[in-house]
C-alpha cells in the first residue's frame, strides 16, 4: 500500500537560508580535472557549511555540492552549463524522485547497494593504480569511511533509477508513431547511422600442452605454500603475479559480486569458501587457472581475492589451428559444405555456433539484440579483417585474444554491409523507434519534475537566483 504522508504541509516551518558560517560563492569551474594535490582546496573536510537550497523539508548543503563536484572531477565528468547552478539543481531533482520512491514504497536491497559501493571504490582504485593509500590520501578518508558515507547516497541513486523506470514503464510507441515523428523532421535532422556489418565466424582454440598446464598449477601451489607458511600475503602475490590486471591492482580483490556475474566453476568454489584464512584448491575457469581466498560474505554476494594464471599457447599450436581453419575455408569456397554448417559443427565458439556463426552485438535496441555492428564495436582484429572484404567473402585465418583473455584462431565471413546513411524506416526501424521512445521518456520525466516542483516548497540562496535552470519553477 502506498504511503499517505504528504511531501509538504499547508503550514511550513521556513528554514532560513543562513549558513553556519558565511563564505563567498564558490568560483565558476569549467575544467574539473584535478590532481591529488588539488583536492585539498575542495575537500569536504575543509568546507564551512551553509544551507543553499531547501526542497520540501530537505536542506541542500554547500558541502553536498562540493562533494559532487569533487567526485565528478575524479571521474572526468564535465557539466553542461554552469556547474555552480547545475550541481545543486541535480541534487534537488534527485530529492524529488527519492521522496516519491518512498511514497510508492519502492525498495532496494542492501546487497545491491553494497555491490554498487564496491564497484565505485574499485573504479576509484583503478584510477590510482590500485593504491589504497593514494585513494585515502586523495579523499581524506579511509576506505571504510568511504563505504559508510556512500551507502545512503547509493541507496538513493537506486531509488531514483527505479522511480524513473516506474514512471516511464508504460510508455510505448507504434510503427505509426515512429513514421509520424520522422516524417515531420527535415532530412538533415534525421539521425546518421554509421556503417554497420553482420559477421559470421568459425573459431578454433589452440591446444595447450599438458606440460604447460602443469607448470601453471605448480606456480599456484607455490603461492599457496608461501601464504600458508607466512612468507608472503595473498594480496602481495596477487599484485605481483596475477594475470587479472584489474583485480591485481587491488591485491586480487573482486569486491562484492553475485553468483551470476562469475564464471560458473569459479562461483561454485568462491561461494563455498567459509574460512578467510584458507586458500582454495586450484580452479579452472574459461579464463585460466585460479586460487581463491574469501574476504567476506554479505547476503547473496561474496567478496574474494584470486590469483589468475593463464597457460601460454605455443607457436606450434597456433600454427596448427590456423592451418586447419585455412583448410576449412578452402573447402567452403570449393562448395564442399557451407560456412553455416561448418560454424555449427566445427567452431569452438559456443556463443556463435548455435547461430550458424553469426556474432551478436551486446548493444540493445529496446528488448531485441541486434546482429549489426558498427566497426568500432567489433573486436579490433575482426574489424581490421572485414573492413576491406566484400559481402559473402571468407577471410584467411587470423588470431586474436578474446574477451576472456584467451588466444583463439578464426576465419570470418562478411554476411552483410549497410553503408553509413541517414536513418530510414525500412532499414533502421529499431534505431528510430528507440529515438522516439527515449524522447517520450525524457519528456515524461521532465514534465513530472516540473509538476512536482509546483507542489513543493523551495527556497534558494540569493546567489542562485540568476541561474539558468533546466527545470522551471524553482524560484517562487
Image (cartoon, rainbow, N blue to C red):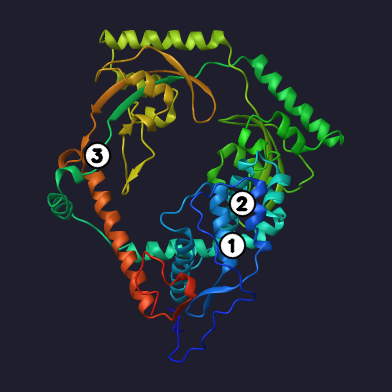
Quarter of the figure with residue 266: top right
* Nearest the eye: 382 or 448: 448
* Residue drawn 43% across the image and 10% down it: 324
Q: Which of marks 1 and 2 is nearer the N terminus?
A: 1
* Total tally of numbered discs in the picture: 3
Res. 356 visible in picture? yes
The residue tagged 1 is 110
Q: Can residue 298 be seen in this view?
A: no
Image x and y of residue 46, in percent: 68, 62
Discs 3, 2 touching: Cβ within 8 Å: no
Could you tell me residue 168's position as x and y percent?
A: 33, 63
- Image coordinates of residue 53 in percent, x first then y, are 50, 74
Label 1 crowd bin: few (<14), some (14–19), many (20+), radius 10 Å: few
Compute the Cα span from label 3 to label 1. 42 Å
| Residue that appears at 61% across and 60% down | 150
Residue that mark 2 sits on:
118
- Residue visible at 69% across and 22% down in the picture: 216
**Separation of disc 1 and disc 2 at Cα?**
12 Å
Secondary structure of the residue carrying numbered label 2: helix
Front tag of 3 and 2: 3
Quadrant that contains the N terminus: bottom left
Foreground tag (3 vs 1): 3
**Residue 80 horizontal/vertical position (percent):** 41, 54
Is 328 situated left or right of 99 in this image? left
Residue found 50% across the figure and 61% down from its top = 157
On screen, 144 above or below 206? below
Label 3 and label 2: CA atoms lie apart by: 38 Å
Q: Is mark 1 on a helix, strand or loop?
A: helix
Q: Locate residue 424: give its quadrant.
A: top left
Q: According to the image, label 3 marks what residue? A: 192
Amino acid at each position: 500500500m502506498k504511503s499517505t504522508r504528504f511531501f509538504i504541509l499547508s503550514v511550513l516551518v521556513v528554514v532560513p537560508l543562513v549558513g553556519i558560517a558565511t563564505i563567498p560563492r564558490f568560483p565558476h569551474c569549467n575544467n574539473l580535472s584535478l590532481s591529488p594535490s588539488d583536492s585539498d582546496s575542495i575537500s569536504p573536510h575543509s568546507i564551512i557549511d551553509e544551507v543553499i537550497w531547501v526542497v520540501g523539508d530537505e536542506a541542500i548543503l554547500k558541502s553536498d555540492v562540493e562533494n559532487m563536484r569533487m567526485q565528478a572531477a575524479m571521474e572526468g565528468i564535465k557539466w553542461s552549463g554552469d556547474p555552480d547552478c547545475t550541481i545543486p539543481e541535480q541534487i534537488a531533482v534527485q530529492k524529488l524522485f527519492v521522496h516519491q520512491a518512498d511514497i510508492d514504497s519502492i525498495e532496494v536491497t542492501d546487497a545491491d547497494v553494497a555491490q554498487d559501493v564496491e564497484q565505485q571504490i574499485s573504479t576509484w582504485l583503478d584510477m590510482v593504480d590500485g593504491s589504497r593509500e593514494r585513494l585515502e590520501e586523495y579523499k581524506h578518508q579511509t576506505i571504510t569511511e568511504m563505504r559508510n558515507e556512500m551507502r545512503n547516497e547509493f541507496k538513493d541513486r537506486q531509488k531514483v533509477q527505479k522511480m524513473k523506470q516506474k514512471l516511464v514503464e508504460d510508455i510505448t510507441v507504434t510503427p505509426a508513431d515512429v513514421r509520424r515523428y520522422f516524417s515531420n523532421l527535415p532530412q538533415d535532422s534525421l539521425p546518421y547511422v554509421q556503417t554497420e556489418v553482420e559477421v559470421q565466424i568459425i573459431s578454433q582454440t589452440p591446444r595447450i600442452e599438458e606440460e604447460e598446464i602443469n607448470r601453471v598449477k605448480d606456480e599456484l601451489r607455490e603461492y599457496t605454500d608461501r601464504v600458508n607458511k607466512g612468507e608472503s600475503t595473498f594480496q602481495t602475490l596477487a599484485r605481483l603475479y596475477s594475470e587479472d590486471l584489474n583485480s591485481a591492482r587491488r591485491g586480487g580483490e573482486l569486491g562484492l559480486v553475485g553468483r551470476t556475474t562469475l564464471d560458473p566453476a569459479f562461483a561454485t568454489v568462491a561461494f563455498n569458501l567459509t574460512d578467510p584464512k584458507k586458500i582454495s584448491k586450484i580452479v579452472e575457469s574459461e579464463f585460466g587457472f585460479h586460487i581463491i581466498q574469501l574476504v567476506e560474505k554479505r547476503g547473496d554476494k561474496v567478496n574474494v581475492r584470486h590469483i589468475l594464471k593463464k597457460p601460454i599457447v605455443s607457436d606450434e599450436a597456433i600454427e596448427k589451428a590456423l592451418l586447419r581453419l585455412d583448410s576449412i575455408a578452402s573447402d567452403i569456397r570449393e562448395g564442399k559444405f557451407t560456412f553455416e554448417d561448418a560454424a555449427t559443427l566445427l567452431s569452438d565458439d559456443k556463443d556463435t555456433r548455435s547461430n550458424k556463426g553469426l556474432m551478436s552485438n551486446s548493444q540493445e535496441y529496446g528488448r531485441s539484440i541486434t546482429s549489426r555492428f558498427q566497426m568500432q564495436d567489433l573486436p579490433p582484429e575482426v574489424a581490421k579483417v572485414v573492413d576491406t572484404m566484400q559481402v559473402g567473402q571468407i577471410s584467411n585465418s587470423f588470431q586474436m585474444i578474446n574477451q576472456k583473455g584467451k588466444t583463439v584462431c578464426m576465419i570470418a565471413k562478411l554476411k552483410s554491409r549497410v553503408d553509413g546513411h541517414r536513418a530510414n524506416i525500412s532499414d533502421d526501424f529499431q534505431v528510430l523507434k528507440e529515438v522516439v521512445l527515449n524522447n517520450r521518456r525524457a519528456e515524461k520525466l521532465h514534465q513530472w519534475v516540473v509538476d512536482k516542483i509546483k507542489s513543493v516548497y523551495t527556497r534558494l540562496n540569493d546567489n542562485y537566483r540568476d541561474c539558468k535552470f533546466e527545470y522551471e519553477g524553482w524560484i517562487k
